[in-house]
Amino acid sequence: MFQLAKVLVVVSLAVSAMAQTSDDIAHMVGAIMTRGGASDFLETLTDTVGGRLTGSPQDREAADLIVKTLRDGGYDNAHLEEYEFATGWQRGAVSAEVLSPIKRRLYVGSYAWVPGTPGRVEAPVVDLGTPTTLALPVPAEKLKGAVVLTRIATTPAPGALSYFVLRSQLTKELAEAGAVAMLVVSDKPNRMVYTSAYGFYPHGALPALSIAGEDAHLLERLLAKGPVRISLDVQNTFGPAPAKDRNVVAELPGTDPGEMVIMGAHFDSWDPAQGANDNGSGVAQVLEAARAMKSLGIKPRSTIRFVFFSGEEEACLGSRAYVTQHRAELDRIRAVLITDSGAQAPLGFQVEGNNDIDAAIQKLLAPLAPLGASRVSHTADFESDYESFMVEGVPSLSLWVEEGDYDVRHHTIADTYEKVEPRILSLDTAVMAVAAYSIANAEQRPARRLSSDEVQQMLKENNLLEEYKVTYGK
């Protein structure tokens, strides 16, 4: 009889816990979808602070704004964590013009963490075509003193070098050959150019510029008829070196604080626009999820830690620094959830490399089915801050959303606030909150941490070894 009574108590407690979990989820979704807090914060971030280049005054202003908003929302433990990175960089004025056989202005934009030119330079244009390897299809003597035009496939053939690896390595090959600069054809419409530092940080080998697709077509047509000569003036500067930046950290303590779930997003962005979708929308999602949980008195089993990273656009600098500073805690992390794909309709979560998480995560994401976001994708990549945890074997997930038109404006001058739909932003926020809470409240963690050997095998299986070597210098 005593044993039966014990069983009944355990069952009663389990049912009660399940009911409480269901109520918490309903309350979180309702609050997030009706308050509009994510959209309000995003408007403040984009219109008041604007673009947030890593290490810039705007980047620091954004970090301070996030801390203040968290503290106003009840997170007295919200704080800044400083780290050093190799060098700062400032974007300067840039201009390009066809000198012969016609006179025509060209629309170009500098990639980041690349040098400028020594004043205004004039040089012939050489078309490199669309290389797939580092074997240059043009003799090196023709590249010396030239501006090199190239197209790089954003979706390479299976087994080929990734876009980022090929782009960064090509600059080194061209610099050794004595080229003046590299023009990479933008895949954006309407003469938009592309901004990025991935593979160039901490110091590109030569000036690398994105050239509007329409202007590239013009150069190609002119080159088909004879020599083309252009002028370039790129006024970028480096410094200070070393430089400093900050991550923002706050947490909602769990009733059993031995383990934690991390929700994260990066707040740095490119400076030509406002960084609204990339990644102001992700910051707004994590911030509003944190405020909703606090205001509703949510008490998860495991601690939920909210981390806002800087320096993602260069090489995940902030998340790599976080991993280094918190290495002793990595074994305590149940999972890391990152949002960095813009405010598009949610589908579920992308599992970054660790397939052991599959069965558990399918079950934990079940409450997201009514929101259309309970699916799991097995694609692994080096696209955002989850990579810093993934290479350490920590179970890592990223919010998986519909493609929509996010990539059209990604890293361009058109990444502005009015492009973000408030309803979808709130929906993504609710999905992130429910997923983090479900994982934190589960009786067991969804998967174990992978060993170093297992991480290397995972990277190999996902064709990420070359990118890992370039990114981490290993």
Image (tube, grey):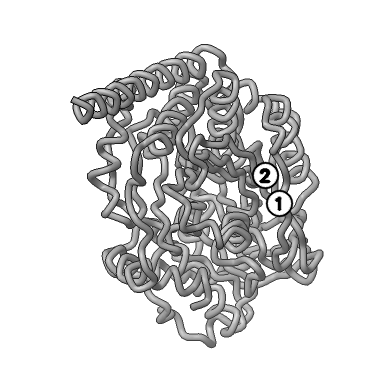
Q: Residue at x 41, y 44 (%)?
A: 398
Left/right placement of residue 84 relative to residue 186 reads right
Which kind of residue does numbered mark 1 sit on?
A: Glu
Cα separation between marks 1 and 2: 6 Å
Left/right placement of residue 80 relative to residue 200 reads right
Q: Nearer the viewer, residue 236 or 99?
A: 236
Mark 1 falls on what kind of element? strand
Q: Which residue is mark 1?
A: 81
Question: Residue 415, image x and y in percent?
Answer: 58, 36
Residue most extreme to the front:
1
Question: Residue 268, image x and y in percent?
Answer: 65, 46
Q: Residue at x 49, y 22 (%)?
A: 426
Q: Residue at x 76, y 57 (%)?
A: 90
For label 1, count other residues whose C-alpha is less than 10 Å away and answer few (under 14), some (14-19) or many (20+).
some
Q: Nearer the viewer, residue 325 or 276?
A: 325
As drawn, 1 above or below 144: above
Q: Residue at x 71, y 55 (%)?
A: 95
Q: Nearer the viewer, residue 381 or 24?
A: 24
Question: Residue 1, image x and y in percent?
Answer: 18, 25
Q: Nearer the viewer, residue 35 or 73?
A: 73
Which kind of residue does numbered mark 2 sit on?
A: Val
Residue 408 can be seen in this image? no
Q: Are marks 1 and 2 in contact (CB under 8 Å)?
A: yes
Residue 369 can be seen in this image? yes
Identify the disc placed on residue 248: 2
Question: Residue 259, image x and y in percent?
Answer: 47, 47
Task: Specify the quadrant of the image occupied by residue 234.
Answer: bottom right
Count of residue discs: 2
As drawn, 216 above or below 258: below
